[in-house]
Image (cartoon, rainbow, N blue to C red):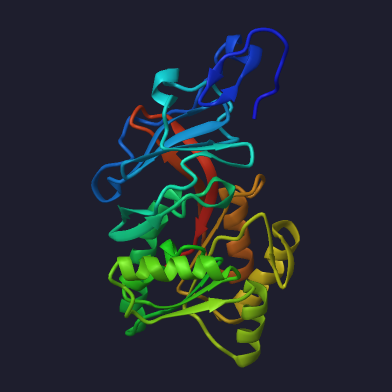
Amino acid sequence: MANLAAGVFVYVAGLCLGDQALAPRKHAPHASPAPCDDGAMADLELIDCGGGRRLERFGEVTVDRPAPAADWLPGLGPQAWAKPSLLWAKSGWSRGAARDPWTVRAGGLTLECRPAAGGQVGVFPEHAATWDWLGRAVAGSTERLGRPPEVLSLFGYTGGATLACAKAGANVVHVDSSKPAVAWARRNAELSGLAERPIRWIVEDARAFVRRERRRGRRYDGLVLDPPSYGHGAGAWHIETDLAPLLADLAAISGPKPSFVLLSAHTPGFDGEYLGALVREHFAIAATGDDLLLRARSGLKLPVGAWARGPYH
């Protein structure tokens, strides 16, 4: 994450910082000090970040992995970073790869974590705040519609958003092109006591599924999607070229106006303002956007993406 230079090298969290470590400290963004791991999110914590990495806690397991946005020096000393349970270095887990799965509680859900590809563990802490919004969106839609809303959850991965909607009473269709990811999501439903809720589990490319639903004349009240920057399903996915056509198809199966839309992304350039503009353009509803942030007890905050949401009232 940092350029290597000749001279003195300082190692922090397994990252060689070179002379950058001796340069004037770049100011790290801070929010008002507020724990990120209290109440319903007690199992999730950002401990520290910097030097292109982040140190987190998932239950009792600490994880050191890349964070490109953290281009400042860590707030804590090397001792805090010295012995994480899991360490992602270069292109693989250099520590903890064989660790057995474990569970965490977040937002009223029980979710399974395990070392996975790309430095992931199956839970995205930055999305936890969106689950609370989804619960309220489902409740508000149920009251307005007089029935449980029909919700489509695309790029559903391990199911956090899907289960938040199901827990609040929605009928949900969960779509992901990865069979192992859908199996993981179903496991999370079982762990969370939601296995019997009305959830359809679909292993398919999101674009192909939505086009077929459009031909069938299917209608959804709520839409949730977290598209990747790149991916493979029925052909390669590139968010820059493929998101807009997908949103157009989604508008056709949620018209004339959906009860709610939640769109998130982790792609540079796809900030909250831009995502909000996409929602307003395609669904003709008001929408606001914000950064997805992780906050440490110290008040340090790490941007890890963005989200936009349209009204549910």
Image coordinates for residue 214, horizontal then vertical, percent: 63, 85
The relative height of residue 23 versus residue 225 in the rendered view (above or below) is above
The number of callouts visible is: 0
Image coordinates for residue 131, horizontal then vertical, percent: 38, 59
Tell me which residue sits at (38%, 58%) in the image.
112
The relative height of residue 84 versus residue 263 in the rendered view (above or below) is above
The relative height of residue 227 versus residue 53 in the rendered view (above or below) is below
Q: Is residue 12 visible?
A: yes
Which residue occupies the foreground of this view, 266 or 83?
83
Q: Left or right: where does residue 154 sit relative to residue 159?
A: right
Image coordinates for residue 168, horizontal then vertical, percent: 31, 71
Tell me which residue sits at (38%, 69%) in the image.
165
Quadrant (top left/top right/bottom left/bottom right) for the C terminus: bottom left
Tell me which residue sits at (46%, 41%) in the image.
96
Quadrant (top left/top right/bottom left/bottom right) for the N terminus: top right
- Which residue sits furthest left? 39
Tell me which residue sits at (55%, 18%) in the image.
11
Q: Is residue 224 visible?
A: no
Which residue occupies the foreground of this view, 14 or 250?
14
Image coordinates for residue 18, horizontal then vertical, percent: 64, 15
Which residue occupies the foreground of this view, 163 or 115?
115
- Which residue sits furthest bottom? 216
- Which residue sits furthest front? 98
Which residue occupies the foreground of this view, 159 or 127?
159
